Image (cartoon, rainbow, N blue to C red):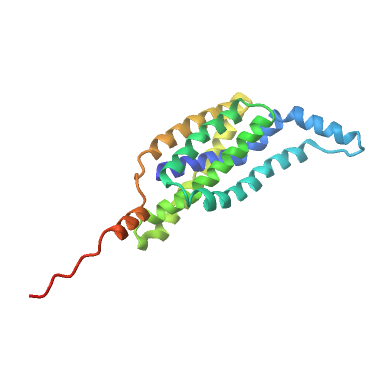
Amino acid sequence: LSVTMALEGVIWQAVMFGAALVFEVKLAPEISDLRDGLASWGVATKVVLWVGLATSMIYVVSGFAQYAMGRRIVDRYPLKATYIVASALQIGAMLALAMGNGYVALLGAIGSAVLSAAAGPIENILIARYTPSRYHGLGFGAKFVVAFGAGPLAILLIAWIRETTGSLELLFLGLAATSVVITLVALLLPNHDRGQEAVVETRRPAPQAAPAE
């Protein structure tokens, strides 16, 4: 779980910090059409406005998604299966960011943020269930350090790859491979939830008192 959280942190930070740079290039034709359409009505806009709006959509959608995922999916389906599916779908989101143009790249970024938002509550529940109660504070603190400590690595990768290649396609292709690793590591998580163990316990017949001699 520490491995998956660290790698998920790299993906999250890379999308958050790199999306605007991707949109500036891959949404250029769409932004140009929007600007021309508004210009015909006498409204002048700048490219940075539309890039900022597209980037803001990631935060807004992922925020609502985290609530919806926790309420509708995480509480209804097995944690491990949901975590694996979210990690596997992240591969497609990274490929969309790397190879897609226009709105495909935008949907890839939004999809990545939604999937990361889905993974967050699952990780929290797993930490709570498989960490002794007296160490919950330590477990959640470790998650914070591991996940957000990956931020500087993501920023360094963005700067180095863009300076070297002139784009971020190689970065997101690498993150697609990283998502494969996350999916494979997630397969090592426990196959059952402790909550299910409690259900099994309640179904067992209560012990009968032995007759007194």
Quadrant location of the N terminus in the rendered image = top left
Q: Can residue 145 be seen in this view?
A: no
Residue 64's x, y, as percent?
A: 62, 50
Residue placed furthest toward the left:
213
Q: Residue at x 59, y 28 (%)?
A: 98
Left or right of 81: which side holds 19? right
Q: Residue at x 57, y 52 (%)?
A: 67
Q: Which residue is drawn at 59% across and 29% down?
A: 96
Residue 142's x, y, as percent?
A: 43, 53
**Quarter location, residue 106:** top right
Total marks placed: 0
Left or right of 155: which side holds 193? left
Quadrant location of the C terminus in the rendered image = bottom left
Residue 205's x, y, as percent?
A: 25, 61
Q: Which residue is drawn at 81% across and 33% down?
A: 34
Q: Nearer the viewer, residue 110 or 71?
A: 71
Residue 43's x, y, as percent?
A: 89, 39
Q: Is residue 100 visible?
A: yes
Q: Nearer the viewer, residue 158 or 77?
A: 77
